[in-house]
Amino acid sequence: MEGLDFETAKKAFIRIRDLRYLELIHSIEERRKRGENDNMVFLADVYSYQSKFAESAKLYKKSGSEHKAMNMFTDLRMFDQAKEYIGSGDPVDKKMLITKQADWAKSSNEPRTAAEMYISAGEFSKAIDILGDHGWADMLIDLARKLDKADRESLTKCAMYLGKLEQYSYAAEVYNKMGDHKALISLHVEAKHWEDAFTLVEKHPEYKIDVYIPYAQWLAENDRFEEAQQAFHQAGLEAEAVKCLDIAGNDVEKREDMLPKFHDFQRKADMYYAYHSIHRYTDFHGFQFGQINTLSVLLLF
């Protein structure tokens, strides 16, 4: 193999059934067919299979194939050595190396380190997912403040996670940075921050319906039908406002119908409570059945 006599090497490895080296020889033969003829690179491949990584890296570098050395050390999780072979400070190679290191940190259950590395590599979406999934709101807002306004995808993702974490002031800060008034109004509605939503609607009346409809529904759910009716009016939904009045009227009628039943249940509950007291007393004092009935009547009536 080291003499690059691959035909002889192949026969030898077939005889001893060493599939690993046979796979390497097959790979080299295929590359030769495609026009690759750098024996120094092939020998470096052989050294890497023999775990002679330092010798392999030197040959890769000598042949002008530093990226192969970098990939080799990266696959071995030897990131410090890999950094030495980033071709002329190539930013693409550097980003790829940091991304791979971040992937490894993530798979090794080191999410904070992984997130920091993804940020260094400019892989903001991956970093935001980790920060959001772990509830690290402080790191999310720090990243959002550093991001460019033009990166709306990453900023929107930051704001979405902050909203889920109920960090509404941080989420609002991000939407303000983006100038996304509709999303900001939706955030205030979701948080039931009605005053903030109304203040924004005064400046952006085109979103009036996005505030007043959920506000009216919220009022109706809380049995504040007259206020809900007014909110529907302000949203320009007259039919819904009329329905609110009907619901309010039906609600009052239902409550009036329930009053006699409620009083009946109350009377029975009082009676059962009294019987419970009698039962405990008679158990303790050993009363006979006839005495219990007499005592019950006396106590209840």
Image: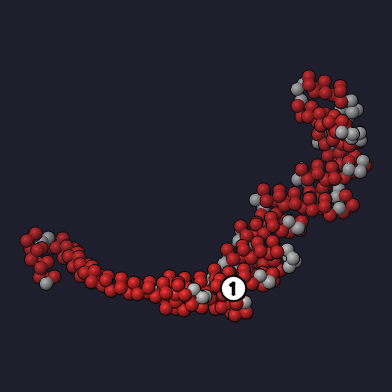
Relative placement, left or right, of 49 versus 268 is: right
Quadrant position of residue 278: bottom left
Relative placement, left or right, of 144 versus 35 is: left
Q: Which residue is at 84% across, 54% downward?
A: 91
Which is nearer the eye, 117 or 31? 31
Q: Position of residue 225 (x, y in %)?
A: 41, 75
- Quadrant of image for the C terminus: bottom left
Q: Which residue is at 78% across, 19% downward?
A: 15
* Residue wearing tag 1: 207
For disc 1, the neighbor class at 10 Å (few under 14, some 14 to 19, many from 20) is some
Quadrant position of residue 270: bottom left
Q: How many marks?
A: 1
Which is nearer the eye, 267 or 294? 267
- Quadrant of image for the N terminus: top right
**Can residue 215 be seen here?**
no
Q: Position of residue 275 (x, y in %)?
A: 17, 65
Q: Which residue is at 86% across, 48% downward?
A: 85
Answer above or below: position of 292 versus 193. above
Relative placement, left or right, of 291 versus 169 is: left
**Can residue 258 be seen here?**
yes
Look at label 1 and name its amino acid: Tyr
Q: Position of residue 29 (x, y in %)?
A: 85, 29
Q: Position of residue 242 (x, y in %)?
A: 42, 74
